[in-house]
Image (cartoon, rainbow, N blue to C red):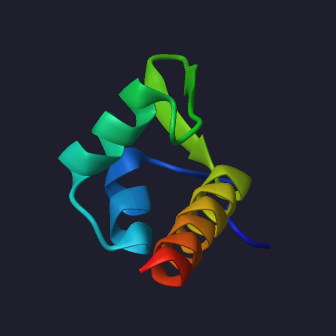
Amino acid sequence: MERLFYRPKDAAAVLGMSRTAVFRLIKTGELRSIKHEGYRLIPACALLEFARKLEGSTAQDTAVA
């Protein structure tokens, strides 16, 4: 079974960025997360959504340039 949720440290590794950057994305609302019993969890689908948005914005930036 695939993982349904990631801790910020693990999400950072998946996205190839720092843990601090992941918390910044959560704070700005760019990356969805939940708190459960004191733990911050990021749904796997939220990581995919973020990657798709990032990929889309990169494609638009390339088309404009």
Q: Is residue 36 above or below residue 58?
A: above
* Residue depicted at x 56% and y 44%: 42
Q: Position of residue 12 (x, y in %)?
A: 34, 60
Q: Locate residue 20 relative to residue 31 in the image: left or right.
A: left
Say left or right for 54 vs 21. right
| On screen, residue 62 above or below 25 | below
Residue drawn at point x = 59 percent, y = 58 percent: 47
Q: How many marks?
A: 0
The relative height of residue 10 versus residue 13 in the rendered view (above or below) is above
Please state the horizontal and vertical placement of residue 24, each as a whole percent of the image: 30, 36
Q: Quadrant of residue 15?
A: bottom left
Q: Furthest residue to the right?
A: 1
Give percent across and percent down for residue 31. 52, 42
Q: Residue at x 50, y 75 (%)?
A: 64
For the point 25% across and 48% down, the residue is 21
Please give left or right for residue 44 compared with residue 22 in the image.
right
Q: Position of residue 38 (x, y in %)?
A: 44, 17
In the rendered view of the protein, which quadrant contains the C terminus? Answer: bottom left
Name the image quarter holding the N terminus.
Answer: bottom right
Query: Observer-nearest residue: 57 or 32?
Result: 57
